[in-house]
Amino acid sequence: MRFIESVFEKLKRHPKRIVFPEGAEPRVLEAAGRFNRMQLGAPILLGDIEQIKRKAEEYRVDLSRIGIIDPTKADDLEIFASRLERLQRYRNIGAGDPREILTNPNYFAAMMIQHGQADGLVGGASQYASSLMRPLIQIIKPLPGITTVASCMMLEGPPDRFGTEGMLMFADCAVVPEPTVDQLAAIGIETAKVCRQLTGARPRVAFLSFSTKGSSRLPAASKMAAAAALARQKADEEKLEIDVDGELQADTALIPALAAIKAPSSRVAGSANVLIFPDLSSGNIAAKLVQQLAGASAYGQVLLGLSRPAADMSRGASADDILGVAAIVGLQAIEYRKLYPQTDDDLLQE
């Protein structure tokens, strides 16, 4: 069974509410309609209600079991505004009128998942990443010990080639331009947790470089080796069942024959299913090349480090992509408290 099909099957047993801030976007409408028909959960579309209805009629999307909320007229607007004013993160940035801010669907959606009125959020299909990331970072509390929000994505190719039955996780491909050693280690650990949750497989995390196990002493390679060592230490401290190694070249991380030559004692080389890139440029370029040249299906970006499940889509995302990511976010929501037991209601309140 393909990775995304297994996600659909698992989510059907525990349907979730996913909020889409771009309710009138045709690709979002199509994805929400299919999410509903497949009994994956309850989609909630934000935006002008009449515009959404016109678009749904134009694209033949049945709205009969899909929620629609206009943030400018929502019953919860005043309640959310009062809660926003009390957030220390909001007060620190010196923002304007909270009611006006919350008429922006991205802010309203962030408040919905923060306060339990939706289980996950999927946005960004028609906007720059900053439009969605800003309200998420300002409103959603980070996980304990996390100082940087990052992202990961899933790429699925032929099941007999790489990763876990053809599925590889890439990070970070969308958020942190030049991650530090600490940030790289955190990205590796958080991506491994998502890998375990979504696939059930043991995460094998490779910190990638142009060098393998000290074949280069340049600072860039040493940085990835240091990040791998720190991630391994963190995994031991948290008693996580994951394997970590680095620095590794990409082919050494993926191809057993090369791993046997270049890193024969590694528990990751030749069988990695989580790839951590040294910077945003390399991660983003690699992900798009794998999509376009290898024809891999891509699902992301799933955000890491937030206390609620959310994803920031590419503006080039298709309806299939949006549907897949919505299902992944829904599946995350099923056991988010188990994955992050610290995120109880008391912790999420300020």
Image (spheres, helix red, strand yellow):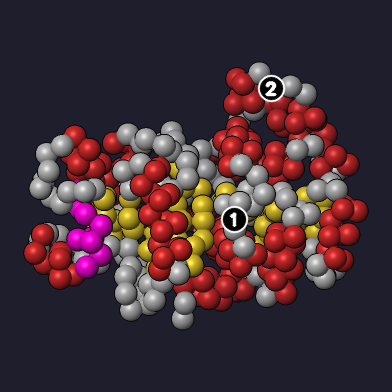
Residue bearing the label numbered 1:
316
Which is more foreground, mark 1 or mark 2? Answer: 1
Which residue is found at the position 51% from the left and 48% from the top?
303
Q: Quadrant of residue 107?
A: top right
Q: Examine the rendered structure and indicate whether residue 215 appears above or below residue 104.
A: below
Q: Residue furthest front?
A: 293
**Looking at the picture, which amino acid does disc 2 mark?**
Ala
Would residue 168 be seen by someone viewing this image from the given angle?
yes
Would you say 278 lies left or right of 45 here?
A: left
Q: Secondary structure at mark 2?
A: loop
Identity of the residue drawn at 31% across and 43% down:
278
* Left or right side of 217 for 313: right
- Is residue 31 left or right of 4 when viewed as pictured? right
| Quadrant occupied by the C terminus | top right
Q: Look at 12% across and 43% down and name the residue there.
A: 216
Q: Position of residue 342 (x, y in %)?
A: 48, 44
Q: Is residue 277 left or right of residue 350?
A: left
The quarter of the picture where residue 131 lies is top right
Q: Position of residue 103 (x, y in %)?
A: 79, 37
Q: Do residues under tags 1 and 2 come within 8 Å of each other at their CB atoms?
A: no
Where is residue 343? Give x, y as percent.
52, 45
Q: Is residue 303 above or below residue 7?
A: above
| Residue ID for mark 2 | 95
Amino acid carrying mark 1 in the image: Gly
Label 1 crowd (10 A; few <14 / some 14-19 / many >=20): few
Task: Give the residues in magenta.
Answer: 247-255
Residue 248: within the magenta? yes
Magenta-colored stretch includes residue 32: no
Which residue lies at the image location 49% right of the left edge and 67% below the top edge?
A: 297
Disc number placed over residue 10 in the picture, else none: none
Q: Is residue 236 visible?
A: no
